[in-house]
Image: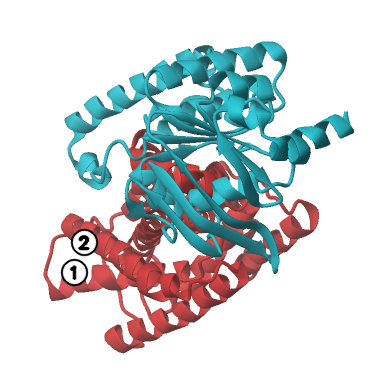
Amino acid sequence: MFNLTDFLQFSFAGLTSGAIYALIALGFCVVNNTMGIVNFVQVDFVSLGGMLMFTALFTLGLPMMPGLLLAVAGVGVVAMLVERFGLRPARSDNHLVLIFLTVGLSIILRGIIKLIWGKNRMALPPLTPDEPISLFGATVLPQALWILLLTIVAIGLLTWFFYRTPLGLSMRAVASNPTAAAVVGIPAGRVRLTSYAIAGALGGLAGVLVTPITTLNYDVGVLLGLKGFAAAILGGFGSFPGAILGGVGLGLLESLSAGYLSSAYKDVVAFVVLLLVLFVRPKGLLGK
Amino acid sequence: MLRLDQVGKNFGGLPALSNVSFEVPQGLVTALIGPNGAGKSTLINCTTGVLQPSSGAVRFLQQEITALPAHQIARLGIARTFQNLKLFPRLTVLDNVLTGLTCVGGRSMLMAMLRLPYLRHRERQLKLRAMEALDRFGLADKAAWQAGSLAYGDKKRVELARATVGRSELLLLDEPVAGLNAEETAEVGDQLKLLRSTGHTMLLVEHDMDLVMEIADQVVVLDSGKCIATGTPDEVRKNPLVLEAYLGRMEAMA
């Protein structure tokens, strides 16, 4: 029997995780558009976001919102350091070399996170008290609403940045034609650094938002990050609307299949979708 | 203003340019001519940092720019167009031209982002300048189009608008009228004359001899990577070396 409340419940859960995948997928796209590579450090930006939030709240004793801003900005700064001192010295234009470098940097960053915060699972409190709200008969956690709201804010800010600021224009120019961008005087280094900062902030925000629901440990970002990667491919790697559509689509697919089929296959769905997309439509839903 | 000293460029051991030396004087139009494969585009690429010369030195306003990356050379005041068009196909026509103003705002991009009213004011001014440039090239009504969707002649003019909007000290134009019809050629020719009359310094690579003879103050002739003649259009036209190596070959082809 079809039950509308169940359907709403599953859909809402799907939207929530979809928003997280979309944030991570956008991070993958920003770096891909300006450097042409897959940045696997993205997965650790997610873990790091949660960890910095933990430190901001419990070591520094900050309130929620300043803590969130600090954590997100902190991951942005770490991401810039990763680009400046991890990738830039490579001085190689070979994309495969750079991609493998990001895999290596990802392992190093995960090691550092493990050294600083340890291997134990930790709990992060939600942004506002944990009393479920009833929406059309479905039960929703306030944290889920925060996730949706802040994801929309982040997408809005990103759009404003890319379409309303000179630096955003420079970044779109580099994505469209790197040689022409250099010849009009756009410094490639600054654009790369900015794209990493944005990717870090997006990953960090995803981490801050999702870890109160999952739990927090040093490699929590790996599975989430890979699903964000799958979402980016589903939407068309490099496409911003595609990343959002892919994220939400993947979240809904996962949640509905967990609800109506079996939750045992929840994590499999993402990768089956990834494989199907690669077989049937390699350029993704909105790919070029 | 721009000075090339013994510039050479090898591609896998084959010399595309060898010991090319000449000067582009301020305020004048220098035309660079030569048969296909003479190394004209290679020379432009070596001057703008798109390629690195294998030997020799390039100086711009007394400063050596030989090993500088392309974006720094652009910041010093050299703008260019490409023979085979390098636009931003996924950006609008207006945004394409706005990128030509990247260097105008100086280094305050990040600062400008923090001062919103100032940023908005500056943005509006830059947009106005970009629209003026589009207007000069008769493209104002296509400002919101995606550059990749334009016809060839329009793309060519967008690139010219992008190169000229920032009023760079030196303009390097690589075959600005190649592939255009007679009417379009005349329009672009008028624009180039206008630029010349306002004191722009240009280095112009062009096959259209009528245009070259009309607007160039000085002509440099390249053949097989070597500079074989330099002089006024009349001098070059009468130079037997040029007639033999360049015009003679053209006649033989015709």
Q: Which mark is residue B136?
A: none
Q: Nearer the viewer, residue B163 or A231?
A: B163
Residue B10 in the image, given as x and y percentages of width and height? 64, 63
| Quadrant of the image occupied by residue A164 | top left
Label 2 sits on what residue type?
Answer: Leu
Q: Chain of mark 2?
A: A
Disc 1 secondary structure class: helix
Q: Is residue A179 left or right of residue B182?
A: left
Q: Is residue B50 left or right of residue B224?
A: left
- Residue underneath mark 1: A56
Question: How many residues crowd mark 1 within 10 Å: few (<14), some (14–19), many (20+)?
Answer: many
Q: Nearer the viewer, residue B128 or A243?
A: B128
> In the image, which lettered chain appears cyan?
B
**Alpha-carbon distance for marks 2 and 1?**
7 Å
| Quadrant of the image occupied by residue B222 | top right
Q: Which residue is at a point 56% across and 65% down the rendered structure image?
A: B54
> In the image, which lettered chain appears red?
A
Q: Nearer the viewer, residue A245 or A180?
A: A180
Label 1 sits on what residue type?
Answer: Ala
Question: How many residues crowd mark 2 within 10 Å: few (<14), some (14–19), many (20+)?
Answer: some
Mark 2 vs mark 1: in front? 2
